[in-house]
């Protein structure tokens, strides 16, 4: 696998890096097509929000230069970026000065069955609940044990994705994706102020919906809201949009708005 | 620094290790005196609980053999153990088969001012709140951004430790330690079923208190309970016990029970 650590080819990380010790850092999984990353600006915006939240030095010109060069070389696939607080001594106190570690990894495009996008998917109903932690909500940090535990709940490939709720039972997201629903012509997606990862595809779709003047609500969503939806889909930057057809006893058709947004995503990624 | 990775001297970790990607693992910071780790059994018991919770292969004979040899070579200081789920592909699903990574690092004994143990300490009142996540509470996993954020709140060395509460305002622990209080002859420490790290020194002290028939309560503790305490202390496996003299507007004397337990800890560590 092609990997850079701070601009140099490397397959390894110093054991004293705080990314390992505390999950003290952020990551982005960036889809690359023909040497371009269509959602790069959205990834960088989220990375910057994460840096501000974690008090990490913000993405610098040097980071941008390395990332741009790495993406160009990648041509197609996924560029995984990890930004950590770098090497530190034992103990939680922030290292001073802080020398962040930038890791870039080039991966092949994931092979998702085409039927997931065309026919839709079944969601596994995860019992793992997401804790409410506003300080970490929305950003893509390296503390991902909740997702690991949720994804470990099922092995059956009939479920390409799982649904996770928060400790109050609110619907939050897929294990590796965000969730939208449409009801009565209104597009809705869970508010992620308390927990969850605010995906870049979610952000892009919210912008598109605004441009298209699709009525839009970012709000708390209950399981009853989800059951009453006219259409449901999950999205992320790698697979785009998958219609959701089934969760436990609930069933939904593949809706017209889902198809319309899938068309926009296809144009975005293939242009 | 002396480091082993899976039994071999190494300073580096594979970039694909899930310890880095997701904080998918556990750690222990083990005090070593003259080639012995007085609290080793308590560390191993917590490690095993963590392994069960994270569905990691339990500490094996091989892990014990490496750890024992490493501790003997260390003689004095701290042995930091990190156990991760090992190398994995992109995505949260558990690798199958799973080949955990065992990292051992030898560190010098931390130099704490002697006055902290004799005269007591002031606690910084952290605004960072701990989220309620029963699935991860009590174990010492690698997802420690809450502690990083809490510890980043102050730089003033007049505060050797900070107090953190949960999102409901209950008193939970120090950033790197557990908290006890005594009131009316009853020793109390916060219940850690919802959040917090159940320290090995806390576990050892709870056992000692039972042996000594000191009335004991593991329960929810409010700031008002803390303020009304007759004595307060924080503890961990590296510094032992520090009396707490001050937190915001509250003051406590160094109490007799604190001194008695300090004596027990000194005997444990020096024997």
Image: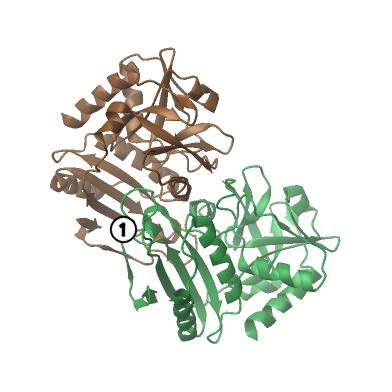
Chain colours: A green, B brown
Image quarter (top left, top right, bottom left or bottom right) of the N terminus of chain B: bottom left
Residue A201 in picture, x, y percent from top left? 64, 69
Considering only vertical position in the picture, is B212 above or below B39?
above
Residue B137 in picture, x, y percent from top left? 47, 40
Is there any visible trace of residue A116 in the rendered image? no
Considering only vertical position in the picture, is A96 above or below A12?
above
- Residue A139 shown left or right of residue A192 in the figure: left
Q: Quadrant of residue A50?
A: bottom right
SS class, disc 1: loop
Q: Residue at x 38, y 45 (%)?
A: B51
Nearer to the camera, A266 or A208: A208
Nearer to the camera, A36 or B210: A36
Is there any visible trace of residue A232 in the rendered image? yes
Nearer to the camera, B146 or B72: B146
Image quarter (top left, top right, bottom left or bottom right) of the C terminus of chain B: top left
What residue would you read off at disc 1? A16
Q: Quadrant of residue B168?
A: top right
Query: In which chain is the residue bearing label 1?
Result: A
Q: Quadrant of residue A203?
A: bottom right
Nearer to the camera, A237 or B256: B256
How many numbered tags mark residues here? Answer: 1
Residue A242 in picture, x, y percent from top left? 67, 68
Residue A68 in picture, x, y percent from top left? 49, 81
Considering only vertical position in the picture, is A58 above or below B171?
below
Binning the other alpha carbons within 10 Å of mark 1 as few (below 14), some (14 to 19) or many (20 upward) gives some
Considering only vertical position in the picture, is B263 above or below B151?
above
């Amino acid at each position: 696998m092609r990997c850079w650590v701070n601009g140099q080819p490397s397959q390894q990380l110093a054991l004293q890096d705080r990314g390992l010790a505390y999950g003290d850092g952020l990551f982005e999984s960036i889809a690359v097509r023909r040497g371009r990353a269509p959602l790069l600006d959205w990834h960088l915006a989220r990375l910057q929000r994460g840096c501000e939240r974690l008090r990490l030095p913000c993405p610098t010109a040097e980071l941008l230069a390395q990332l741009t060069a790495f993406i160009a070389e990648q041509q197609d696939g996924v560029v995984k970026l990890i930004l950590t607080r770098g090497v530190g001594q034992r103990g939680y106190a922030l290292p001073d000065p802080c020398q962040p570690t930038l890791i870039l990894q080039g991966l092949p495009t994931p092979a998702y069955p085409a039927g997931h996008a065309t026919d839709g998917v079944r969601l596994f109903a995860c019992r793992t609940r997401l804790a409410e932690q506003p300080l970490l909500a929305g950003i893509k940090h390296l503390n991902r044990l909740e997702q690991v535990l949720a994804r470990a709940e099922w092995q059956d490939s009939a479920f390409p994705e799982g649904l996770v709720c928060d400790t109050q039972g609110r619907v939050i997201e897929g294990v590796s994706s965000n969730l939208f629903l449409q009801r009565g012509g209104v597009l809705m997606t869970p508010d992620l102020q308390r927990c969850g990862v605010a995906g870049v595809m979610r952000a892009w779709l919210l912008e598109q919906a605004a441009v298209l003047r699709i009525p839009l609500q970012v709000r708390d969503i209950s399981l009853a809201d989800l059951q009453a939806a006219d259409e449901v889909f999950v999205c992320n930057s790698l697979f785009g949009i998958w219609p959701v057809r089934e969760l436990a006893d609930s069933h939904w058709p593949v809706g017209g708005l889902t198809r319309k947004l899938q068309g926009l995503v296809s144009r975005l990624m293939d242009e």
